[in-house]
Amino acid sequence: MPGSGEIPLNHHRANIREPMPLTGVPPAFDRTPGFEAIDRIARDGFWEILEKTAGILNQNDIYVTEIEDRTKEEVAKLKQQLIESEKLHLEEELKSKAEISMLKEQMRNLEIKCGQTDTKLEAKMKLLDMTEAKLSALLKEIGVLHTQIDKTEAKNKEYEAMIEELEREASELRSRLVEFTKGKDESSVPLLHALKEDWQDKTLCKFDGSEHL
């Protein structure tokens, strides 16, 4: 059929001249009965070979057409795979770019946080230095207070000794007064009032530290 790639069997007979006899006998003698048989056999063999060749060519055309169709299908598949691969590659590239952008943003945020942390840390270090300075001053004040406490304790011990001494003197005076005033009126004894006043003066002097016995 036209356009199908097939060669009609009668195509060669319609367009090819009759071949010369294959016997090599001149044309003047090829019409004799014996030579006509030989010539006919030769022609029939020739046409048979030609028909077989045409069939082979037609079969080859069919194979070529099938190969072309398969090749086109494979090319189409490869093109589709290439398109899908490029699409996948593009998606992966966009995804990678998005991840890189996100990582960059995280790094910027971390840098900002680190800067804020450094500022806070610096402020805390300054506060710590101030605290250490205050603590050192407090320790000095505590040392001074300890010294004052030690002095006060020493003074208290002195006062306690004075009080004990005064108590002994008072006890002794009371004993003397009792002995002295036995059977007498205090108002009639001026010396008794003088002793009391003297004892009171000494007691006050010992407590305010203006006099030491």
Image (spheres, rainbow, N blue to C red):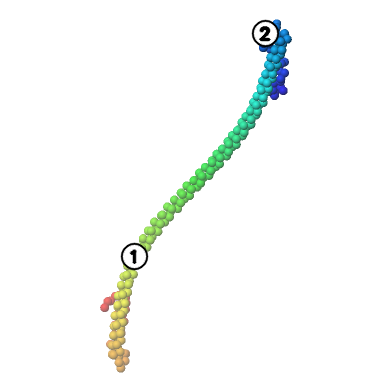
Name the amino acid type tagged 1: Gly
Instruction: Classify the position of the C terminus by image quarter.
Output: bottom left
Q: Which one is in front, 163 or 39? A: 39
Camera sees residue 63: yes
Determine whether, in the image, residue 67 is placed left or right of residue 162: right
Front-lying residue, 92 or 24: 24
Quarter of the N terminus within the rendering: top right
Q: Residue furthest bottom?
A: 183
Q: Residue at x 32, y 70 (%)?
A: 150
Q: Residue at x 67, y 18 (%)?
A: 49
Disc assigned to residue 25: 2
Q: Report if the CB atoms under discs 2 and 1 are less than 8 Å apart.
A: no
Q: Is residue 72 above or below residue 150?
A: above
Q: Which mark is residue 143?
A: 1
Q: Is residue 169 left or right of residue 132?
A: left
Please, what secondary structure does the residue beneath circle 1 have?
helix
Query: Of the residues under marks 2 and 1, which one precedes in the sequence?
Result: 2
For the residues labelled 2 and 1, the Cα–Cα distance comes to 151 Å
Picture coordinates of residue 114 (x, y %)? Answer: 46, 49
- What kind of residue is marked 2? Val
Residue 203 in the image: state x and y as whole percent: 31, 80
Dot 2 surroundings within 10 Å: few (below 14), some, or many (20 or more)?
few
Residue 63 placement: quadrant? top right
Foreground of the two, 25 or 188 = 25
Find residue 29 and name its label.
Answer: none
Q: Residue at x 62, y 29 (%)?
A: 71
Q: Is residue 199 visible?
A: no
Residue 50 versus residue 110 in the image, above or below? above
Image quarter of residue 129 = bottom left
Identified at 41% across, 54% down, the residue is: 125
